[in-house]
Amino acid sequence: MGGTDDKAAEDFRALLRGLRVRESGELPAFDPATAPREPLPLFRRWLREAAEAGVPGPHTMMLATADAEGRPSVRTVMLHDADEQGWHFGTHRTSRKGRELAVRPYAALGFDWTEQGRQVRIGGRVTAAGPEESAADLRGRSPAALTAALAGGGRQSEVLGSYEELVRAFEAARERVEREPDATAPSWTLYVLAADEVEFYQEEERRRHVRLRYRRAGEGEDGGWRRELLWP
Protein backbone atom coordinates (compact mmCIF):
# COMPACT_ATOMS: atom_id res chain seq x y z
CA MET A 1 0.00 0.00 0.00
CA GLY A 2 2.82 2.38 0.82
CA GLY A 3 4.24 2.20 -2.70
CA THR A 4 0.83 2.86 -4.25
CA ASP A 5 0.22 5.83 -1.96
CA ASP A 6 3.68 7.25 -2.71
CA LYS A 7 3.06 6.93 -6.46
CA ALA A 8 -0.33 8.64 -6.17
CA ALA A 9 1.21 11.46 -4.13
CA GLU A 10 4.04 11.96 -6.63
CA ASP A 11 1.57 11.93 -9.55
CA PHE A 12 -0.48 14.57 -7.79
CA ARG A 13 2.56 16.78 -7.19
CA ALA A 14 3.55 16.37 -10.85
CA LEU A 15 0.06 17.45 -11.86
CA LEU A 16 0.33 20.57 -9.73
CA ARG A 17 3.75 21.47 -11.13
CA GLY A 18 2.47 21.10 -14.68
CA LEU A 19 -0.61 23.26 -14.32
CA ARG A 20 -0.71 26.75 -15.74
CA VAL A 21 -2.72 29.59 -14.23
CA ARG A 22 -3.74 31.02 -17.59
CA GLU A 23 -3.05 30.72 -21.29
CA SER A 24 -0.28 32.89 -22.64
CA GLY A 25 -1.40 36.19 -24.06
CA GLU A 26 -0.98 39.91 -23.76
CA LEU A 27 -1.68 41.27 -20.30
CA PRO A 28 -3.16 44.70 -19.61
CA ALA A 29 -0.65 47.39 -18.76
CA PHE A 30 -0.92 49.06 -15.37
CA ASP A 31 1.04 52.18 -14.53
CA PRO A 32 0.47 52.87 -10.83
CA ALA A 33 1.54 56.49 -11.34
CA THR A 34 -1.71 57.06 -13.23
CA ALA A 35 -3.92 55.45 -10.57
CA PRO A 36 -6.66 57.64 -9.04
CA ARG A 37 -6.38 59.06 -5.54
CA GLU A 38 -9.07 56.68 -4.23
CA PRO A 39 -9.52 52.96 -4.89
CA LEU A 40 -13.20 52.88 -5.89
CA PRO A 41 -12.83 54.33 -9.43
CA LEU A 42 -9.97 51.95 -10.20
CA PHE A 43 -11.92 48.97 -8.86
CA ARG A 44 -14.95 49.84 -10.96
CA ARG A 45 -12.77 50.22 -14.06
CA TRP A 46 -11.01 46.90 -13.54
CA LEU A 47 -14.29 45.05 -12.99
CA ARG A 48 -15.80 46.64 -16.10
CA GLU A 49 -12.73 45.71 -18.14
CA ALA A 50 -12.93 42.13 -16.84
CA ALA A 51 -16.58 41.94 -17.89
CA GLU A 52 -15.87 43.42 -21.31
CA ALA A 53 -13.00 40.96 -21.79
CA GLY A 54 -15.38 38.05 -21.18
CA VAL A 55 -14.02 36.98 -17.79
CA PRO A 56 -16.63 34.56 -16.34
CA GLY A 57 -18.43 35.90 -13.27
CA PRO A 58 -16.23 38.95 -12.68
CA HIS A 59 -18.53 39.98 -9.82
CA THR A 60 -17.87 36.80 -7.84
CA MET A 61 -15.56 37.23 -4.87
CA MET A 62 -14.13 35.33 -1.94
CA LEU A 63 -15.42 36.48 1.45
CA ALA A 64 -13.36 35.67 4.54
CA THR A 65 -14.75 36.01 8.06
CA ALA A 66 -13.73 34.68 11.48
CA ASP A 67 -15.59 33.29 14.48
CA ALA A 68 -15.32 34.40 18.11
CA GLU A 69 -12.11 32.33 18.56
CA GLY A 70 -10.52 33.84 15.48
CA ARG A 71 -10.85 30.74 13.28
CA PRO A 72 -11.29 31.90 9.68
CA SER A 73 -13.69 30.64 7.05
CA VAL A 74 -13.97 31.58 3.40
CA ARG A 75 -16.57 31.17 0.67
CA THR A 76 -17.60 32.61 -2.70
CA VAL A 77 -20.36 35.24 -2.85
CA MET A 78 -21.62 37.83 -5.32
CA LEU A 79 -20.85 41.54 -5.24
CA HIS A 80 -24.11 43.50 -5.26
CA ASP A 81 -22.67 47.01 -5.48
CA ALA A 82 -19.58 49.10 -4.83
CA ASP A 83 -20.06 52.76 -3.97
CA GLU A 84 -18.88 55.43 -1.57
CA GLN A 85 -20.32 53.44 1.35
CA GLY A 86 -18.34 50.33 0.51
CA TRP A 87 -18.63 46.89 -1.10
CA HIS A 88 -22.12 45.34 -0.79
CA PHE A 89 -23.11 41.68 -0.51
CA GLY A 90 -26.09 39.81 0.88
CA THR A 91 -26.72 36.68 2.92
CA HIS A 92 -28.90 35.32 5.69
CA ARG A 93 -27.85 36.76 9.04
CA THR A 94 -28.45 33.28 10.46
CA SER A 95 -25.85 31.73 8.13
CA ARG A 96 -22.33 30.95 9.32
CA LYS A 97 -20.94 34.13 7.77
CA GLY A 98 -23.80 36.16 9.22
CA ARG A 99 -23.20 34.76 12.70
CA GLU A 100 -19.46 35.37 12.43
CA LEU A 101 -19.97 38.95 11.30
CA ALA A 102 -22.25 39.49 14.30
CA VAL A 103 -19.39 38.71 16.70
CA ARG A 104 -16.46 39.93 14.58
CA PRO A 105 -17.66 42.66 12.20
CA TYR A 106 -14.57 42.60 10.00
CA ALA A 107 -14.02 40.77 6.73
CA ALA A 108 -11.79 40.48 3.68
CA LEU A 109 -12.78 40.20 0.03
CA GLY A 110 -10.79 38.76 -2.85
CA PHE A 111 -11.36 39.12 -6.60
CA ASP A 112 -9.38 37.02 -9.09
CA TRP A 113 -9.55 37.89 -12.78
CA THR A 114 -7.04 35.28 -13.92
CA GLU A 115 -7.42 35.88 -17.64
CA GLN A 116 -6.12 39.41 -17.18
CA GLY A 117 -3.57 38.57 -14.49
CA ARG A 118 -5.39 40.78 -12.03
CA GLN A 119 -6.42 40.45 -8.40
CA VAL A 120 -7.99 42.84 -5.90
CA ARG A 121 -7.90 42.36 -2.11
CA ILE A 122 -10.13 44.43 0.18
CA GLY A 123 -10.39 44.52 3.99
CA GLY A 124 -12.43 46.52 6.45
CA ARG A 125 -15.32 46.77 8.87
CA VAL A 126 -18.72 45.35 7.93
CA THR A 127 -22.10 46.77 8.90
CA ALA A 128 -25.58 45.38 8.32
CA ALA A 129 -28.20 47.42 6.50
CA GLY A 130 -31.71 47.83 7.88
CA PRO A 131 -34.71 45.62 7.02
CA GLU A 132 -36.06 47.88 4.26
CA GLU A 133 -32.75 48.17 2.43
CA SER A 134 -32.11 44.44 2.84
CA ALA A 135 -35.57 43.60 1.46
CA ALA A 136 -34.97 45.92 -1.50
CA ASP A 137 -31.67 44.16 -2.18
CA LEU A 138 -33.40 40.78 -2.30
CA ARG A 139 -36.19 42.06 -4.54
CA GLY A 140 -33.57 43.33 -6.96
CA ARG A 141 -32.15 39.85 -7.51
CA SER A 142 -33.27 37.30 -10.09
CA PRO A 143 -36.29 35.00 -9.50
CA ALA A 144 -33.85 32.09 -9.16
CA ALA A 145 -31.87 33.91 -6.46
CA LEU A 146 -35.07 34.88 -4.65
CA THR A 147 -36.22 31.25 -4.80
CA ALA A 148 -32.97 30.08 -3.23
CA ALA A 149 -33.20 32.70 -0.47
CA LEU A 150 -36.78 31.71 0.37
CA ALA A 151 -36.05 27.99 0.21
CA GLY A 152 -33.32 28.33 2.79
CA GLY A 153 -35.66 30.19 5.08
CA GLY A 154 -32.76 31.28 7.26
CA ARG A 155 -31.42 27.71 7.52
CA GLN A 156 -28.30 28.28 5.43
CA SER A 157 -25.27 26.36 6.78
CA GLU A 158 -27.48 24.13 8.97
CA VAL A 159 -27.34 20.33 8.59
CA LEU A 160 -29.67 19.07 5.82
CA GLY A 161 -31.60 15.89 6.56
CA SER A 162 -31.79 14.70 2.94
CA TYR A 163 -31.55 15.99 -0.60
CA GLU A 164 -35.25 15.30 -1.06
CA GLU A 165 -35.97 17.83 1.69
CA LEU A 166 -34.01 20.42 -0.28
CA VAL A 167 -35.95 19.64 -3.45
CA ARG A 168 -39.28 20.05 -1.68
CA ALA A 169 -38.21 23.35 -0.14
CA PHE A 170 -37.12 24.73 -3.50
CA GLU A 171 -40.34 23.63 -5.20
CA ALA A 172 -42.41 25.35 -2.52
CA ALA A 173 -40.28 28.48 -2.78
CA ARG A 174 -40.56 28.53 -6.58
CA GLU A 175 -44.34 28.36 -6.37
CA ARG A 176 -44.33 31.18 -3.82
CA VAL A 177 -42.17 33.38 -6.04
CA GLU A 178 -44.66 32.88 -8.88
CA ARG A 179 -47.50 34.00 -6.57
CA GLU A 180 -45.55 36.69 -4.73
CA PRO A 181 -42.73 38.13 -6.87
CA ASP A 182 -42.08 40.72 -4.13
CA ALA A 183 -41.76 38.15 -1.34
CA THR A 184 -38.98 38.66 1.18
CA ALA A 185 -36.99 36.42 3.50
CA PRO A 186 -36.91 37.98 7.01
CA SER A 187 -33.37 36.79 7.70
CA TRP A 188 -31.94 38.15 4.43
CA THR A 189 -29.48 40.94 5.19
CA LEU A 190 -27.51 43.35 3.06
CA TYR A 191 -23.97 43.88 4.36
CA VAL A 192 -21.58 46.69 3.47
CA LEU A 193 -17.81 46.45 3.89
CA ALA A 194 -16.25 49.89 4.44
CA ALA A 195 -12.69 49.35 3.24
CA ASP A 196 -9.67 50.61 5.11
CA GLU A 197 -7.27 48.76 2.78
CA VAL A 198 -7.51 47.90 -0.93
CA GLU A 199 -4.72 46.26 -2.93
CA PHE A 200 -4.54 45.98 -6.72
CA TYR A 201 -2.29 43.32 -8.24
CA GLN A 202 -1.31 43.26 -11.91
CA GLU A 203 0.69 40.32 -13.22
CA GLU A 204 3.60 41.08 -15.55
CA GLU A 205 5.05 38.60 -18.03
CA ARG A 206 8.58 38.89 -16.63
CA ARG A 207 7.16 38.45 -13.13
CA ARG A 208 7.77 42.08 -12.23
CA HIS A 209 4.25 42.18 -10.89
CA VAL A 210 2.74 45.49 -9.80
CA ARG A 211 1.13 45.72 -6.36
CA LEU A 212 -0.52 49.00 -5.43
CA ARG A 213 -2.04 49.30 -1.97
CA TYR A 214 -4.42 51.98 -0.78
CA ARG A 215 -4.65 52.49 2.98
CA ARG A 216 -7.08 54.85 4.60
CA ALA A 217 -5.28 57.65 6.41
CA GLY A 218 -5.40 57.42 10.19
CA GLU A 219 -6.29 60.00 12.80
CA GLY A 220 -3.99 63.00 12.83
CA GLU A 221 -3.21 62.59 9.14
CA ASP A 222 -4.70 64.31 6.16
CA GLY A 223 -7.97 62.67 5.16
CA GLY A 224 -8.35 60.31 2.24
CA TRP A 225 -6.11 57.45 1.15
CA ARG A 226 -2.40 56.74 1.12
CA ARG A 227 -0.97 54.89 -1.88
CA GLU A 228 2.10 52.69 -1.69
CA LEU A 229 3.80 50.11 -3.89
CA LEU A 230 4.59 46.65 -2.47
CA TRP A 231 7.23 44.12 -3.41
CA PRO A 232 5.66 41.25 -5.35
Image: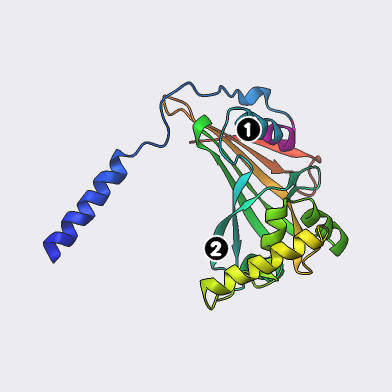
Q: Amino acid at mark 1?
A: Ala
Of labels 1 and 2, the one closer to you = 1
The answer to which image quadrant residue 181 occupies is bottom right
Decide which of 95, 202 is in the foreground and name it. 95
User: Label 1: how many residues lie within 10 Å, few (<14), some (14-19) or many (20+)?
Assistant: some
- For residue 42: magenta? yes
Q: Residue at x 41, y 25 (%)?
A: 24
Looking at the picture, does residue 135 appear above or below residue 21? Answer: below
Image spot of residue 120 (x, y percent):
60, 40
The answer to which image quadrant residue 74 occupies is bottom right
Q: Residue at x 74, y 33 (%)?
A: 41
Bounds of the magenta span?
A: 37-43
> Which is the main secondary structure of the residues drawn in magenta?
helix
Q: Which mark is residue 73?
A: 2
The answer to which image quadrant residue 17 occupies is top left
Q: Residue at x 75, y 45 (%)?
A: 81
Q: Amino acid at mark 2?
A: Ser
Instruction: Name the element at disc 2.
Output: strand
- For residue 116: magenta? no
Total count of labels: 2
Q: Residue at x 74, y 31 (%)?
A: 37
Task: List the residue tagged with mark 1.
Answer: 51
Q: How is the image coloured?
A: rainbow
**CA distance for labels 1 and 2:** 28 Å
